[in-house]
Image (tube, rainbow, N blue to C red):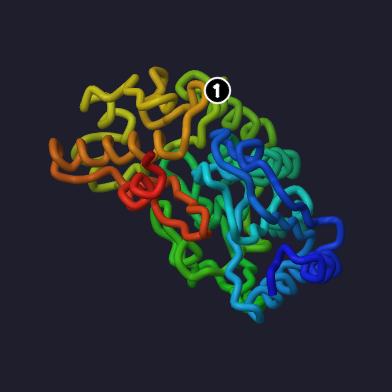
C-alpha cells in the first residue's frame, strides 16, 4: 500500500491521532537548516503508538526513518521519500521516584537536566548543554566532558522494527564511548529509567552553570549547526588531541565549501553560513577525514549521520562518494 494514499493516511491517523503531517520541509526541522521535503512525518505520543506504527509499516514492507531533534543528522536536499517517525515533544513525560527517574525518549535533554537539578539528583550534569532528545542521547551514548549517559541508565525501553516492545538492562546496551547497540539494531528508543545519586541542588546548579558558560565561550551559537561533527576517539585523542585541535592543526579551521564552513570559533563545528547544501556538508566532512588519514594516519570518524532520500542512513564520511555522485549536476 502506498503510505501516501488516502486510505493509508486514514489508517495511520487512527494509529497516531493528531500526529500525521504530509509535505514537511526538513530544512525547517533540521538543526543545520538543510534538507528537502519529507513526504510523510508521524509524531507518536506513546510507546503503544510507536509499536502500532512500526507494526503497520512492517506488515507492508516499509521501513521508516526515525528522528528526534536532528542534532546529529544531515538530511539530503532531495528530502525523504519514505515515512519518517519523529520522537519529540509529544513523548516528553517524566516521573521521579526517589533516585529513579523514568522519562520518555522525546524529552529535551537540557530540560531533563534542569528537572534532575530541581530534584537534587546529580551525576548527569554533563548533559545539560546537549541540544537533543533523550532517545538520541542514549543512541549515541552522548554527553560532555568525555562522559556518556549510559553510565546513568538502569534500563532502556525500545520498539523493534516489527513493533515488539523490548526492555533492555543498561548492561546489555553495548555502551561505549559514543556507541550503543541502538546505532545498528534498528530499534526505536521510547523511554528509559535512570538511577542518580542525591546531591545538593546548589552544587548541581553551580556545575551546570560552569558547563554552560564553557560551551557558550567555545562553541558557535548563532549559525545553524548540528553540534560536534566528529567523534573524539580515545586513541586519537591520546595521540593528537580532540577533533577540534586536530582539524585546526591541519589548517582547516575556516575552510569553506559553498556555504558549509568550519567554524572559526571551534573547528569541530561546521556551520551553515547561508544556504549550504547537503552535498557541501558531505564534501567538507570527507575532506577533513581524508586529510586526517593522510597526515596523521587515522581518519576522523563522523558523529553526524547522513539520511538519504530513500531513508538509508550511515556516518557522513561513508555517504560522501555515493551522495556526491547522486547530487552532482
Report crowding for label 1: few under 14, some 14 to 19, many 20 or more residues within 10 A (C-alpha).
few
In the picture provided, is 97 more to the left or to the right than 290? right
Residue at x 56% of width, y 39% of height: 130
Q: Which residue is mark 1?
A: 221
Query: Which structural element holds mark 1?
Result: loop
Nearest the eye: 97 or 31: 31
Residue at x 67% of width, y 46% of height: 121
Residue 45 placement (x, y as % from top left): 79, 59
In the picture provided, is 258 more to the left or to the right than 79? left
Quadrant of the image containing the N terminus: bottom right
Quadrant of the image containing the C terminus: top left
In the picture provided, is 32 more to the left or to the right than 301? right
Residue 183 placement (x, y as % from top left): 47, 61
Quarter where residue 28 is shown: top right
Q: Is residue 219 visible?
A: yes
Q: Is residue 264 above or below residue 169?
A: above
Q: Is residue 30 above or below residue 213?
A: below
Residue at x 68% of width, y 62% of height: 191
Q: Is residue 72 visible?
A: no
Residue 5 placement (x, y as % from top left): 75, 66
Nearest the eye: 155 or 180: 180
Q: Is residue 210 above or below residue 78?
A: above
Residue at x 27% of width, y 36% of height: 287
Nearest the eye: 151 or 267: 267
Amino acid at each position: 500500500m502506498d503510505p501516501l494514499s488516502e486510505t493509508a493516511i486514514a489508517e495511520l491517523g487512527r494509529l497516531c491521532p493528531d500526529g500525521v503531517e504530509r509535505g514537511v520541509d526538513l530544512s525547517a526541522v533540521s538543526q543545520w537548516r538543510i534538507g528537502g521535503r519529507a513526504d510523510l512525518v508521524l509524531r507518536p505520543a506513546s510507546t503503544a503508538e510507536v509499536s502500532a506504527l512500526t507494526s503497520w509499516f512492517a506488515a507492508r514492507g516499509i521501513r521508516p526513518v526515525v528522528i528526534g531533534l536532528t542534532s546529529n543528522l544531515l538530511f539530503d536536499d532531495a528530502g525523504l521519500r519514505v515515512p519518517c517517525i519523529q520522537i519529540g515533544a509529544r513523548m516528553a513525560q517524566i516521573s521521579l521516584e526517589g533516585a529513579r527517574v523514568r522519562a520518555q525518549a522525546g524529552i529535551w535533554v537540557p530540560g531533563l537536566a534542569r528537572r534532575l537539578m530541581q530534584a537534587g539528583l546529580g551525576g548527569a550534569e554533563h548533559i545539560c548543554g546537549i541540544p537533543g532528545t533523550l532517545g538520541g542521547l542514549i543512541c549515541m551514548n552522548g554527553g560532555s566532558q568525555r562522559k556518556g549517559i549510559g553510565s546513568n541508565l538502569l534500563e532502556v525501553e525500545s520498539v523493534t522494527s516489527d513493533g515488539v516492545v523490548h526492555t533492555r538492562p543498561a548492561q546489555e546496551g553495548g555502551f561505549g564511548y559514543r556507541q550503543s547497540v541502538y546505532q545498528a539494531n534498528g530499534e526505536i528508543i521510547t523511554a528509559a529509567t535512570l538511577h542518580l545519586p542525591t546531591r545538593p541542588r546548589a552544587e548541581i546548579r553551580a556545575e551546570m552553570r560552569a558547563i554552560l558558560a564553557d560551551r557558550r565561550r567555545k562553541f558557535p551559537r548563532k549559525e545553524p549547526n548540528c553540534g560536534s561533527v566528529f567523534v573524539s576517539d580515545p586513541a586519537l585523542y591520546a595521540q593528537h588531541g580532540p577533533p577540534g585541535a586536530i582539524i585546526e592543526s591541519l589548517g582547516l579551521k575556516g575552510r569553506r565549501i559553498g556555504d558549509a564552513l568550519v567554524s572559526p570559533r571551534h573547528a569541530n563545528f561546521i556551520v551553515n553560513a547561508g544556504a549550504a547544501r547537503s552535498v557541501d556538508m558531505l564534501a567538507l566532512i570527507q575532506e577533513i577525514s581524508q586529510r586526517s588519514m593522510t597526515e596523521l594516519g587515522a581518519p576522523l570518524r563522523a558523529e553526524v549521520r547522513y539520511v538519504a532520500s530513500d531513508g538509508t542512513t550511515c556516518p557522513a564520511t561513508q555517504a560522501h562518494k555515493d551522495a556526491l555522485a547522486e547530487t552532482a549536476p
